[in-house]
Image (tube, rainbow, N blue to C red):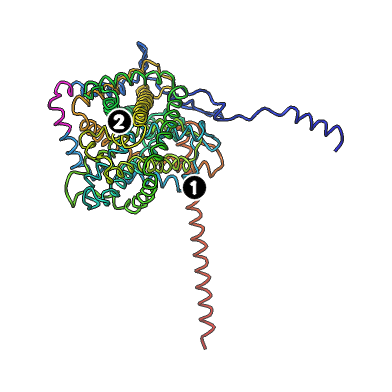
Amino acid sequence: MSFDESSDLGSEHDHPPADPVDPVRDRPEIRGLQVEPENPHGEPTPDRSPGDTNIAKWGFDLHPQVTLWSAGFLVVFLLLTLVFKDRAERVFADLLSGIGATFGWFYILVANVFVVAVLAFAFSRFGRIRLGGQYARPEFTNFAWYSMLISAGMGIGVMFWSVAEPIRHYAEPSPFFGVDARTTGAERAGLVTTFFHWGLHPWAIYALVSLALAFFTFNRGLPLTMRSVFYPLLGERIHGLWGNLIDTVAVIATLFGLATSLGFGVQQVAAGGQLLFGTPDTTWFQVVLIAAITGLATLSVVAGIDGGVKRVSQINLNLAVVFFLFVAAVGPTLFIVGSLVESTGAYVQTLPSLSFWTETISGGDWQSGWTIFYWGWWISWAPFVGMFIARVSKGRTIREFVIGVVLVPSLLTFAWMSVFGGSALYVQSEGIRDVASAVESNVSTALFDLLEAFPLTFVTSLVGIVLVMSFFVTSSDSGSLVVDHLTSGGKLDSPVPQRVFWAAMQGAIASVLLLGGGLLALQSAAVASGLLFACVLLVAIYSMKRAFDHEMLFIEAGRPAPPSASAATAEGQRLLTEAAAEKDAELAELEKVAARERDEYDQRRASASRKRRP
């Protein structure tokens, strides 16, 4: 090497090239659920655009059919519940028991179908498909991604039920296990049943919806709405009546599912406030709390995903981790670890039979108030959580996505339930506190009664209240973004007053449900709204399979799919036809070869036979 060459090389080191583009650091700020369609190859796109039939007046930008149908239904429901408040509780009770008795088997079956479908998509050849195209990269770090998954997916629920559910199952175990109440067998059954309700099944439901939405948005350039999932079956008709109906069902299911969670959360906040500060724990005070916390949620709504949801979600997760570690350290640590290991193994062992148990042969109505309620709740939450997860999951393969959305959160949930539920079972069985009686008296006090057994009760109870409130904010915030997006036809950036309106509507529904029947009304609303949406998801699985088949053809051909759904569908169908023709040609050629070999074999046998003749 000459001196000049080395000098040039040294000059390069003195002036290094600019940093490569970081997809997380250098992406534009995300304020809503908007997705800018990508078209790097300049291919033709359809004339339709999100929200092109909207009505834009008085600070709103709304899809007329979806908004009027869903809002009209909700207004009628709220008025009837308030007018006939005395009869509403009985109606909700009959609704819950009726759906459980008539459609319980259906809920049990479809939940298993959703689990199998998601795992099949992830661990088959489809697992290679990347959301956003084969060269897309994630827009969020793994920590930020998991924070938003957990906060949006189950935040309020795990706070409310992590102590209450294992204790309830300890006092009244599921008939499936055939054990007596308040025994060691009931302890094991309590945690296993809780794992079942909060494990693979709910997260698989979320993963199914979010995977479908992410694929059709990032890989096919369609709006981030439920109607887009059905493009392989309906084509451009997703912009008409059927698409409007699908999005309307998604809006109603989302709002009822959210209202159920918000109702649970505010009941817990009110119960904690009464224990710590002596505030009233009445239905009307809970309504006031809903209004106040919904007001806080609107501030996060205005800030958008990067400024609001992501920051609050990360604060939630950090505070939850500290809370989790504190209880694990001051509680019965060895019992917690042992129960986690033992209950996880028992869960895996009993999962196949427990998943298909319908209580038909044994009889009874235990399942209506538990498993059927949970499956309905998760399904009704699925459009909200699924749309939110989809928006933040660009750049991940289907296999990576399913592992991240199903397996990791399930294990984290098991750990959380073991720390809080396991501690409650230990405290109860050792006679330290009678948590079961507190839960039976008021299920909302379960967490705070457990914390009475540990040091720093006031501080930890206050942290529990803050966590529930912050999870309330992220759920309301994320939910209003989702509903707003659906009712604006998937428009890229809808007005802020519109988001505030839907945040207020969530609070109104939760308030009316509490006034019309409390916990029972919340459970009935979730189960009823999830039933119809479960049918929608069954059809969506077939639609996803067709779209993934086309996507694999583009991957195997080594070229990107067209950016528009219509072009990708047409080109995918052409490749599918060509592949089928090539396969038929190969089979025909193989048949010719086989026929030729048979003829040659027959000729050799005939020749040998002639030679053997005298």
From this view, report whether residue 430 is shown above or below residue 504.
Answer: below
Mark 2 lies on residue: 261
Would you call the spot at circle 2 few (<14 residues within 10 Å), some (14-19), or many (20 or more)? many
Q: Is 357 on the left-hand or right-hand side of 2? A: left
Q: Is residue 502 visible?
A: no
The residues colored magenta run 80-92
| Residue nearest the observer in this picture, 1 or 556 | 1
Q: Are marks 1 and 2 in contact (CB under 8 Å)?
A: no
Q: Report which quarter residue 273 is drawn in.
A: top left
81 inside magenta stretch: yes
In the rendered structure, which amino acid carries the disc numbered 2? Ser
First of labels 1, 2 by sequence position: 2
Q: Nearer the viewer, mark 1 or mark 2?
A: 2
The answer to whether one can see residue 25 in this image is yes
The image shows residue 445 at horizontal and vertical percentages of 26, 32
Q: Which residue is mark 1?
A: 579
Q: In which quarter of the view is residue 228 placed? A: top left
Q: Return the residue found at the far left.
A: 87
Q: Which is nearer the eye, 84 or 391?
A: 84
For badge 1, the amino acid type reads Ala
